[in-house]
Image (cartoon, rainbow, N blue to C red):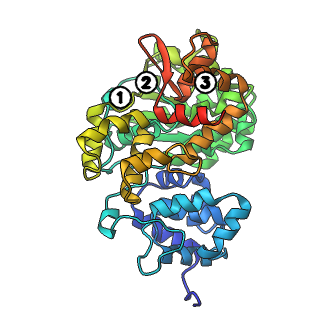
Amino acid sequence: MPIPESPSFTDQVRNLVQRRNLPIEQVANLANLSRKTLYRWINGEVARPRHWSEVVALSRALRLNLTEVELLLHAARQPSYSELWEIARFEHETDLLESFQRAAPLQPEEPHRHMRPGPSSGTWATLENPEGAVRPESPFYIERDADLQLRSQALGNGTTTTVQAGRQSGKTSLLIQVMHTLPTDRVKIVYIDFQIMEDRARSDLSGLLQFLADIIAEQLDVAPSLVDNYWQNSHNPAQTFNRFLQNEILQPSDRLILLAIDEADILLDTTYKKHFFALLRAWDSRRAFDPLWRRLNLVIAISTQPYLLIDDVNLSPFNVGINLVIQDFNSDQIADLNRRHGNLLTPRELAPFMALVGGHPYLVRQALFTLAAENITLPRLIEHASEPDGAFGRHLRYYRYHLERNPILLEVLLQIYQGRSAFDQNAADRLSAVGLIKKEKNKWLPRCGLYAEFFLEQR
């Protein structure tokens, strides 16, 4: 059956993003796209994506149905959805299509042969895919102690705050939630996700600081030409960036400036990371004698140990201000989330549920989402939990991929999971920072049963 004429790819994306009613930054994060890419699509600067996976990822983030996805693929001059399954098997991209199936409200009158049983259309009105950041108005966001602390820091005068947690533990969701609640008459907000940084910007300190200046100018409506003027004759990137901040951002502002840097540990492998983080530390020293710089509040979100980013404590921004370590959900918070999902678990099932996923925020949400979306029982979820293509497969394979490239960390992880006590403590610190182990009563343990089962099976 031929697909009817449809609006251009640009028009469709623009309308669908507006309908989703989320900030473009959040849509980009949900789709694992750079914000610049999404802006270019919306503004018509790029007529269509280069690869079908970008269309499917955006469709998943926007919660489109099959008809809408087909129209979007057609406008992007990509194969139809049904044809993508064969292509995805060849390109090893079936994970993305399976993830889309779990998230999107496919039309019941046109079920796909790969589609597993899902919830009713009414359930989809509130059910949310746990991938990416939790939107501000979500009924599934659980406030923790860190929310109140970060809100207080964001409204302070010249504060530095480090938010530390493992991957998919809620750092970005925390930042978005707190920023959403801040009074706009008191605070101007700049949110920068280092994941969208292009290779050119990441190549050296000058490129990084110019990238930061561009983002700050864009979000605070400063003319791009001003940024260019500062960098035309720049000989010292740090001094140039500081002058730009002082003259174009802090001096004209009658409000606090909150600069939130997410995924800052992307700089871990760069040669200049020490100089960048030393620059952030210097802002704290400058606040002591220059009231203008007390208008700037800084938040840095990381998923690694601070000493791996800068080993000189006298130059580190991570030992000034406060360090918020995001805690896992406790049993009461998990019971609350279960109620918000419609009491999928009985009171007796909460204990085996926590034995599987612990209080890991993403794993808890993914497990509840899977129970609802696939209409399965907890025993069935537990039975298939550690399978590489199961509900937690992408998350588990991500860790396996990176650990296989660091045999020392993998060996220490297996030693801890096997209950041994003699191992490299520095390696254990790194495994704790990325969220694979936890410390209880001065003993390292698996963060959850799922991790131990998966990695011990992979030996």
The N terminus lies in quadrant? bottom right
* Label 1 residue SS: helix
Query: What x and y, as percent, mark residue 22?
Result: 41, 57
Residue indicated by mark 2 = 325
Give the camera-side residue of 26 and 154: 26
Residue indicated by mark 1 = 146
Give the camera-side residue of 325 and 394: 394
Q: What crowding class fits label 1: few (fewer than 14 Cα within 10 Å), some (14-19), or many (20 or more)?
A: some
Q: How many marks?
A: 3
Residue indicated by mark 3 = 413
Tell me the residue at 60%/39% (across/down): 194
Tell me the residue at 43%/34% (across/down): 257
Above or below, 166 against 51 in this view is above
Which image quadrant for residue 275? top right
Viewer-nearest of discs 2 and 3: 3
For the residues labelled 1 and 2, the Cα–Cα distance comes to: 8 Å
Above or below, 32 against 113 in this view is above
The C terminus lies in quadrant? top right
Viewer-nearest of discs 3 and 1: 3
Query: What x and y, as percent, mark residue 184?
Result: 33, 43
Query: What x and y, as percent, mark residue 445?
Result: 49, 21
Q: Earlier in the sequence, mark 3 or mark 1?
A: 1
* Label 3 residue SS: helix
User: The residue under label 2 is which amino acid type?
Assistant: Val
Image side of residue 181 versus residue 443, left or right: left
Labels 1 and 2 touching (C-beta < 8 A)? yes
For the residues labelled 2 and 3, the Cα–Cα distance comes to: 21 Å
